[in-house]
Amino acid sequence: MKCPGCGKWNRANLPHCVYCGMELPDDAYGINGTPAWQRDLKDGEKPKSYIRVDEYGSAETTDDPRDTLADDMARLKNRKIAGEQRQRMLRENAVARGMAPSGRSVRTTSNRSTFFSSYDDNPNTTLRPVAPELVENTSDQPGARRVYSTKYRTTYETDSQASLYQYAPVKENQDLLKPDENQTVYDGYQDFSEYIPDNQPSQRGYTQFSGNTYVHHKPRRNRAARFLRTLLLVAVLCGLLVLGASLLPKLLNANKDDHVAKATVTPTIRDDLATHTITIPGVDDQRITIRELHMTAIVIGGVATFDIPDHLWYEDYLDYLQESMTVTVSPFILSDSGTQTPLEQITYEIDIPLSPIDLNTPDNPYKVVSTALYTIEFFVREGSTVTINGEDYSDLVNTEGGKVSYNATVQPIGENNYEIVVRSQYCRENSMTVTLYREKQEIPLDLASDIGNTSSDKSRTMTIRATTLPGAVVKVLSPHTDLNITNAAIDGSFSFRAVFDKIGDNTIVITADYPGRKQTRVEHVVHYVPNIDVYSRSAWDIVSQYTDLMDQMELRKANSQIYVCKGVITSIETTKPQRAYMNVGTEESPLLVYVENSSKTQWVEGESYRLYGDVYGMYNRVPWLIVRYTYGLNESARLPISTFSPKL
């Protein structure tokens, strides 16, 4: 240990100093037997620790690197200050004992102009000036004197005042023979803050011959050097242009890659429900979780894929008053240790759909009717809640397709309104109003409630029963037979058989007259289509009779001529009603017809069918047929196609 008297080191187990005999302290090892010098070498306190806890309770302990860096910088500064003080103390002790100080001072500030001016390892160029405040003044020390090395002595002294040894050569504005009293002197040398070695030419075009005599030489201009510098500059510019041209495409591709690497949101359909697919880029086998939905996916092929149904965001709401909503998801990367690294949040819009209502009959929400009972038929999603005029009719929903049939009582008061409200799962509430108009009657005239709207009787007739005011005069203005008005004068009942003279819609017209009252007129439409056995017997082949049909269009239309068409649905033009173009020819020689679907089978574009339909007219210079029956090409009709030849 170190002796407190003479300051010399002794063995730790000695009781007295072997140099001065002073008793050594018995706490050489200090607390717990640890030497004091070991305690001085210990590191400082451990930097601060930070404990981060996420929402799920996962804790992570980390050190702030800025605290460590600040401690290192503080210790470095303290060491530099202590080193300067130690150097100053050593020099003062050396001067006090009459010893010559070192020829080169130790300093902590840099001077790039002299430090980097070393040529050929000349020691003259390694001397650097020291800031004046760091140079100690030794002139007050008794017995101290300035010592100058012969290496820096000059040989042209002129008087006793110029006995100080100077550096040579130096700046032109320095008086070497009479140094300024303000010039810095350290370690026995003058400091001019700039040193030029003996073997280096003057930097300003001056050459020293002797004493303070200088001869100025104007630097020569080297044209070749200037040309080489210009040529080098042009070459550098060309190189930069070439480098920029090569790097520009890479930068553009990098921007594209950055764009591709971002998360994408794509609207899709999953299980007939609106869904958004989110793809998040990552490293394979990483686990990415979406905190709001507690969904986790593994990165495969560079992306993690999430299929998020839209209804997850609003299915818990009781009322959906808004058409759309903005949602935000927060993805996190899960590490094996449970650490969660947040990624950029993803925001997108979702639409909240209306509950579907597909009205089948009537064709549109406003319908003029003549009967006291009318069937309203529409389709909803299975499991929907249905109310009509405030009453719950959910039990009418057909589970095999969501079909609802409602028998509406129509009063002869003009407009009869029926408000239909539907609420389906994952949808907003939707409503529709169907208006059935029945003209006001001064003479009541009602058809029987069991009178249908369609008929397929091969006799092309239908029995119609009705009642009116007893004593009223009843007339049937449409084709009919077997009118029976026997009881009309007693109870106002009558009947007849309506005759359908065409395929499709046939209108039955009845009037009732009574003295002193306005006439009542009732019109009832019946859609007549024979069954396939009867219908197909009259079918002509459209391919062989195409020219005849084009030439005799009005005649074939008046007779409701039936044709069979075999071909491919090339394009669907409308969906309600479904209308499309069909090629009944070949790809090399196409033959088009325009067909309207009145059958029970929905067509698919690109599929092949066998269609039975009657002539309706022309559309875009091709025949227009109303199709009553649809079959596949491999599904034959019950009867063969008629071989009857048309007659003009």
Image (cartoon, rainbow, N blue to C red):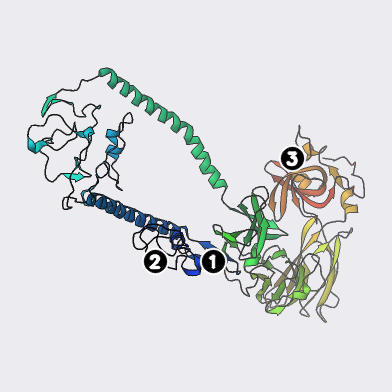
Q: Which mark is residue 123?
A: none
Q: Which residue is mark 2?
A: 23
| Residue at (74, 73) in percent of width and height | 512
Q: Quadrant of the N terminus?
A: bottom left
Question: x, y percentage for residue 423?
Answer: 68, 71
Q: Which residue is mark 3?
A: 592
Cα distance in 3D space between marks 2 and 1: 56 Å
Mark 2 belongs to which amino acid?
Glu
Query: Which residue ends up furthest to the left in the rendered image?
Result: 159
Question: x, y percentage for residue 626?
Answer: 77, 51
Among the 4 quarters of the image, the one containing residue 620 = top right
Mark 3 belongs to which amino acid?
Leu
Q: Which residue is mark 1?
A: 52
Q: Is residue 80 left or right of residue 417?
A: left
Sequence-earlier tag: 2 or 3: 2
Sequence-earlier tag: 2 or 1: 2
Front-most of 163 and 382? 163
Cα distance in 3D space between marks 2 and 3: 126 Å
Q: Is residue 537 left or right of residue 287?
A: right
Query: Which residue ends up furthest to the right in the rendered image?
Result: 639
Q: Quadrant of the C terminus?
A: top right
Tell me if mark 2 has few (under 14), some (14-19) or many (20+) residues whose alpha carbon lies within 10 angstroms of its own.
Answer: some
Sequence-earlier tag: 1 or 3: 1
Among the 4 quarters of the image, the one containing residue 100 = top left
